[in-house]
Image (cartoon, helix red, strand yellow):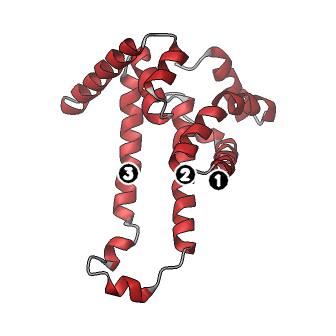
Amino acid sequence: MAPKAETQWIEQACRGSQQAFRMLMERHHAGVLRQLKKRLGNDEDAEDIAQQAFAKAFENIHSYSPKYAFSTWVYSIANNCCIDFVRKRAKGSTVSIDKLVEDENFNAQNALPNPEENMIAEQDLVTAALLLEKLKPQYRRVVELRYLKEYAYEEIAEELKMPIGTVKTTLFRAKDQLMKMIVTPK
């Protein structure tokens, strides 16, 4: 469940308030940036993609559904922007055709993005978000910090003001609950 202030900011942003969206951005920018830096290893690219992700989020704020955590929604946008960036960068890089032909393991079919795999990955993301929403709030928060924001155990402990052992136990229980939901869906 989103904090009351965040819910109000979302409602105001849906009505076009840039100030309300700026508050949402300030709340989530550091986490999105941390996630992108870990993935890209480049601070400048990560900052550019974070800005792009928040711009897309603002443009598409009407598509946000309150049944999901805002952080989950904005992290998935950032992740998609990151994937697009990496693909564009890969297309721009030059590879010698002779080198590829010499490589016995090269398979041209596998070198191209597979639309079916992309669709499955997107469906998996939606399914994961739905399952996350079914978790108890204390479990959901730890999972979001660990796997969406890619926090280390120490960072989670600091953020939630709990011992590392409790973080690990809570994460274990959350994963156990998720596994049970997957095995025996209701």
Q: Do the residues under discs 3 and 1 have CB atoms within 8 angstroms?
A: no
Is 101 on the left-hand or right-hand side of 65?
left
Residue type indicated by callout 2: Leu
- In the picture, the disc for residue 59 is none
Q: Where is residue 117 in the image (x, y as percent from the top left)?
A: 34, 59
Q: Position of residue 132 (x, y in %)?
A: 39, 28
Toward which corner of the image does residue 70 lie, by quadrant?
Answer: top right
| Residue that numbered label 2 is attached to | 40
The Cα–Cα distance between marks 3 and 1, rounded to whole angstroms, is 23 Å
Mark 2 neighbour density, 10 Å: few (under 14) some (14–19) many (20 or more): some
The local secondary structure at tag 2 comes to helix
Report the front residue among 58 and 150: 150
The Cα–Cα distance between marks 3 and 2, rounded to whole angstroms, is 19 Å
Mark 1 neighbour density, 10 Å: few (under 14) some (14–19) many (20 or more): some
Question: Can you say whether 118 is above or below 179 in the image?
Answer: below
Toward which corner of the image does residue 31 lie, by quadrant?
Answer: top right
- In the picture, the disc for residue 121 is 3
| Residue that numbered label 1 is attached to | 45
- Residue at 64% x, 53% y: name it: 45
Question: Can you say whether 158 is above or below 143 in the image?
Answer: above
- Is residue 77 in sight in this rendering? no
Q: Position of residue 183 (x, y in %)?
A: 19, 32
The Cα–Cα distance between marks 1 and 2, rounded to whole angstroms, is 7 Å
Q: Do the residues under discs 1 and 2 have CB atoms within 8 angstroms?
A: yes
